[in-house]
Image (spheres, rainbow, N blue to C red):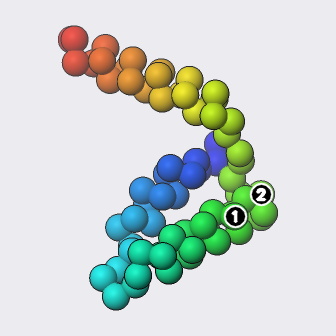
Amino acid sequence: MSESFLNVLCVRTGQQGKDMSHNQWLVELANAVFSKLERGQSEFVSNEDARQDMEARKSRIRNKARC
């Protein structure tokens, strides 16, 4: 399965750098994400699918905490 936008964002956030402005960093991040999408290395996830995935993840985390 392809990396989601959030995965790319999490990885790239640590690489922001102190000398790069936030706007410049954000533009580079968006360009990297769209380039990856155009190369077929990622896939679009609808808002509803993303919500369902997050609810499933939260449920697994809650269930682990109960054990």
**Label 2 packing within 10 angstroms: few (<14), some (14-19), many (20+):** few
Q: How far apart are marks 1 and 2 (CA)?
A: 10 Å
- How many numbered markers are drawn? 2
Answer with left or right where residue 24 lies relative to residue 14.
right
Residue 34 got which mark? 1
Q: Which residue is found at the position 49% from the left and 51% from the top?
A: 7
Compared to 31, does 40 lie above or below? above
Could you say where residue 41 lies in the image, as x and y percent from the top left?
71, 57
Q: Which residue is found at the position 43% from the left and 26% from the top?
A: 57
Q: Which residue is found at the position 38% from the left and 24% from the top?
A: 58
Cβ atoms at labels 1 and 2 below 8 Å apart: no
Could you say where residue 6 lies in the image, as x and y percent from the top left?
50, 50
Compared to 64, does 45 lie above or below? below
Mark found first going from the N terminus, 1 or 2: 1
The kind of residue tagged 1 is Phe
**Label 1 packing within 10 angstroms: few (<14), some (14-19), many (20+):** some
Find numbered disc 2 in the image and state the secondary structure of the residue it sits on. Answer: loop
Could you say where residue 14 lies in the image, as x and y percent from the top left?
35, 67
Residue 40 got which mark? 2
Q: Nearer the viewer, residue 3 or 18?
A: 18
Mark 1 vs mark 2: give the one in front.
1
Find numbered disc 1 in the image and state the secondary structure of the residue it sits on. Answer: helix
Q: Quadrant of the C terminus?
A: top left
The kind of residue tagged 2 is Gly
Residue 8 got which mark? none
Q: Quadrant of the N terminus?
A: top right
Q: Residue furthest front?
A: 23
Q: Which of 47 and 15 is in front in this view?
A: 47
Could you say where residue 42 lies in the image, as x and y percent from the top left?
69, 53
